[in-house]
Amino acid sequence: MNRLDQQWFKKLIDSVNQLPLLPRDSLVLGDTVIGSVVSDAFNAVMVNQTSVGHDDLRKIQTTDGLIWKIMGDATKVLQKIAHVLREAHYARVAEQWQDEPLAVFDALGQQIAVVERGVIRALGMASQGVHLVGDRKSVV
């Protein structure tokens, strides 16, 4: 790699390795952090809704800070959260909604839930996917 390429690459890496612009709270399932949410904005949406109850999601203060802990069936709770965020027009969830379920994985790569693709970014979750590209000329 020449010097210009090395400088460009370092700048690129530095641009993606940044702290969040707004404070975020962990989204937790069991003992596993599966994502994070913008503290004040997520709290404002969740406090003013009735679809996701205390038996589904709890806001807990820990020694490490505030966490949002998913209780019960993770897929069902995440689906409820997704619909609340969509209806509230939170973090462009409504615009990104695709009616496409994506797997949620723990740190060991085990699937632990399923969630709507459009809510992945808003919930600070990592995702996996495959992007296929082709052209009609190559189809037999």
Image: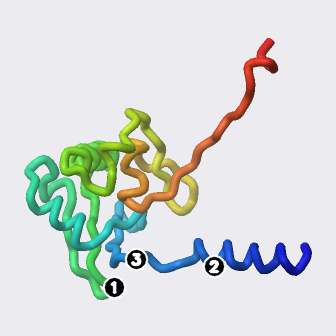
**Disc 2 marks which residue?**
14
**Location of residue 62 in the rendering, given as x and y in whole percent from the top left corner:** 27, 82
**Location of residue 135 in the rendering, given as x and y in whole percent from the top left corner:** 74, 25
**Location of residue 90 in the rendering, given as x and y in whole percent from the top left corner:** 26, 55
In the image: residue 50, left or right of residue 113: left
Residue ID at (80%, 12%): 140
- Badge 3 crowding class, 10 Å Cα cut-off, few under 14, some 14 to 19, many 20 or more, is few
Tag 3, which secondary structure? Answer: loop
* Observer-nearest of 92 and 116: 92
Spatial separation of the CA atoms under disc 1 and disc 2: 26 Å
Closer to viewer: mark 1 or mark 2: 2
**Disc 1 marks which residue?**
64
* Observer-nearest of 33 and 92: 92
Is there CB contact under 8 Å for labels 3 and 2? Answer: no
* Observer-nearest of 112 and 133: 133
Tag 1, which secondary structure? Answer: loop
Spatial separation of the CA atoms under disc 3 and disc 2: 15 Å
1 or 3: tag closer to the N-terminus: 3
| Any part of residue 70 in sight | yes
Amino acid type assigned to the residue bearing label 2 in the image = Asp
1 or 2: tag closer to the N-terminus: 2
Q: Does 70 appear above or below 114?
A: below
Q: Quadrant of residue 124?
A: bottom left
